[in-house]
Amino acid sequence: MADTTNRLAGVAYLSVDGQSYMLAGEVSYSVSRVKRTTLSGPSGVQGYSEEPIPGSISGSFRDAGGLTVAKFNAMTNNTVTVELANGKTIIGRNMWTVDSQEVKSGEATFDVKWEGPTVEEA
């Protein structure tokens, strides 16, 4: 068995409510909870404003024969789980898809992005 203690990147798995899907490219995630904007005026930098932002998970998927792409567009209130090569597990709960999914026939791929209240690293 190969020693993977130094593996940091490469292999990744993504599932939605326990159903695994074939990844065709990278997975991205954001665990940020706020967006800050610097406030300045004629007298200098005065502070910042802060507003909440959603957590997100996105990826590029393979359009396998038995897959229904429209199912992704209908996803709301889902748990999205990502397992990364470095041993981290990324979990987003109560997530929904944003944007529309467009399949690229040359490689049979499409992109999906979920957003929700929070995304956590474990």
Image (cartoon, grey):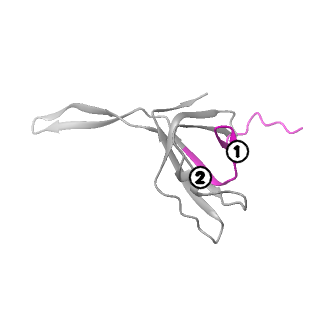
Q: Vertical placement of 97 versus 104: above or below? A: above
Q: Earlier in the sequence, mark 2 or mark 1?
A: 1
Spatial CA span between label 2 and label 1: 13 Å
The x, y position of residue 64, in whole percent, is: 71, 60
Q: Which residue is labeled 1 in the image?
A: 20
The structure residue drawn at horizontal position 63% and vertical position 55%, both measured from the top left corner, is: 61
**Amino acid at the residue labelled 2:** Lys
The structure residue drawn at horizontal position 72% and vertical position 58%, both measured from the top left corner, is: 66
Choose top left, top right, bottom left or bottom right for residue 103: bottom right
The x, y position of residue 77, in whole percent, is: 52, 37
- Residue 88 is left or right of residue 36, and the answer is right
Residue span colored magenta: 1-28
**Amino acid at the residue labelled 1:** Ser
- Checking the image for residue 71, the label placed there is 2
On the rendered image, what quadrant is the N terminus found in?
top right
The x, y position of residue 68, in whole percent, is: 64, 57
